[in-house]
Amino acid sequence: MFITNAYAQSATDSAAGVFGGSGFEMIILFVPLMVVWYFLLIRPQRAQAKKRDEILKNIRRGDQIVTSGIVGKVTKVIDDKELEVEIADGVRIRVVRSAISEVRVKGEPVKADAA
């Protein structure tokens, strides 16, 4: 005969008895993974977000800002959420602080194109 009898393996014969069950094994596997995720992903993102919030909060009149490709100079701080920005001579727009991608302080020179 080419067919042999197959026998089911009981739960006590498996290696699960060493760790006390599959639930404990999952904890042993996922706890180090969560610790690595925290230190490599979550913690640096929180620090970066905190730094960005601090920079946006400290914008004052005269600072040069960049918003989605538009460069302008802050002429007036309206409130905690909005600024008035001059993008050309006599052209002023209102900008929401969260839309600002970069803050250049007034003392920072603009890079010249290599021509």
Image (tube, rainbow, N blue to C red):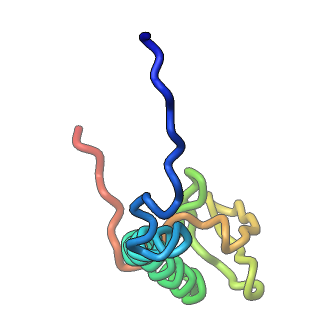
The quarter of the image holding the N terminus is: top left
Depth check, front residue: 49 or 17: 17
Q: Which picture quadrant has residue 71?
A: bottom right
- In the image, residue 69 above or below residue 31: above
- In the image, residue 102 above or below residue 83: above
Residue lying at 50% horizontally and 32% vertically, measured from the top left: 6
Percent from the top left, x then y, of residue 33?
Answer: 41, 69
- Residue found farthest to the top: 1
Residue lying at 36% horizontally and 79% vertically, measured from the top left: 107
The quarter of the image holding the C terminus is: top left
Q: Which picture quadrant has residue 60?
A: bottom right
Can residue 36 be seen by looking at this rendering? yes
Residue lying at 43% horizontally and 59% vertically, measured from the top left: 13
- Residue found farthest to the left: 114
Percent from the top left, x then y, of residue 111?
Answer: 31, 57
78 with respect to 63 (left or right): right
Percent from the top left, x then y, of residue 61?
Answer: 58, 84
Depth check, front residue: 89 or 56: 56
Percent from the top left, x then y, of residue 46?
Answer: 50, 80
Depth check, front residue: 30 or 76: 30
13 with respect to 22 (left or right): left
Residue lying at 53% horizontally and 87% vertically, measured from the top left: 54
Can residue 105 be seen by looking at this rendering? no
